[in-house]
Amino acid sequence: MSHQTSLTERGSFAVARCSCGWAGPARRSRDRARADAETHALTLPSPSPPPDPVDA
């Protein structure tokens, strides 16, 4: 699954959101909300390599 983050504004607050359904806390600082999104992206597990083909 590809993770696409975005910033949503609600009044004077900004919230980082991800396509996986994750949402960070509401922040008054857009920079902090962007940092939340970056931290989320960095803590994702690495994609698994494809399985080895089985010899028949």
Image: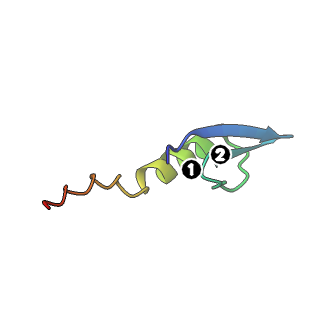
Q: How far across and down, in percent of the image, does residue 5 sit?
A: 58, 41
Label located before the other in sequence (2 or 1): 2
Q: How far across and down, in percent of the image, does residue 29 sit?
A: 67, 42
Relative to residue 40, is residue 14 drawn left or right? right
Number of marks in the image?
2
Contact flag, marks 2 and 1 (Cβ < 8 Å): yes
Badge 2 local density, few (<14 within 10 Å), some, or many (20+)?
A: many
Which color scheme does this rendered protein use? rainbow
Q: Secondary structure at mark 1?
A: helix
Relative to residue 19, is residue 56 drawn left or right? left
Give the quadrant of residue 24.
bottom right
Q: Which mark is residue 16?
A: 2
Q: Amino acid at mark 2?
A: Ala
Q: Which mark is residue 36?
A: 1
Q: CA distance from mark 2 to mark 1?
A: 7 Å
Work out which quarter of the rendered image holds the C terminus and state it: bottom left
Residue depicted at x 43% and y 57%: 43
Of all residues, the one furthest to the front in this rendering is 56
Give the quadrant of residue 9.
top right
Q: How far across and down, in percent of the image, does residue 38 sit?
A: 49, 45
Badge 1 local density, few (<14 within 10 Å), some, or many (20+)?
A: many
Q: Amino acid at mark 1?
A: Asp
Relative to residue 55, is residue 45 drawn left or right? right
Of all residues, the one furthest to the right in this rendering is 11
Residue depicted at x 52% and y 44%: 3
Q: Secondary structure at mark 2?
A: strand
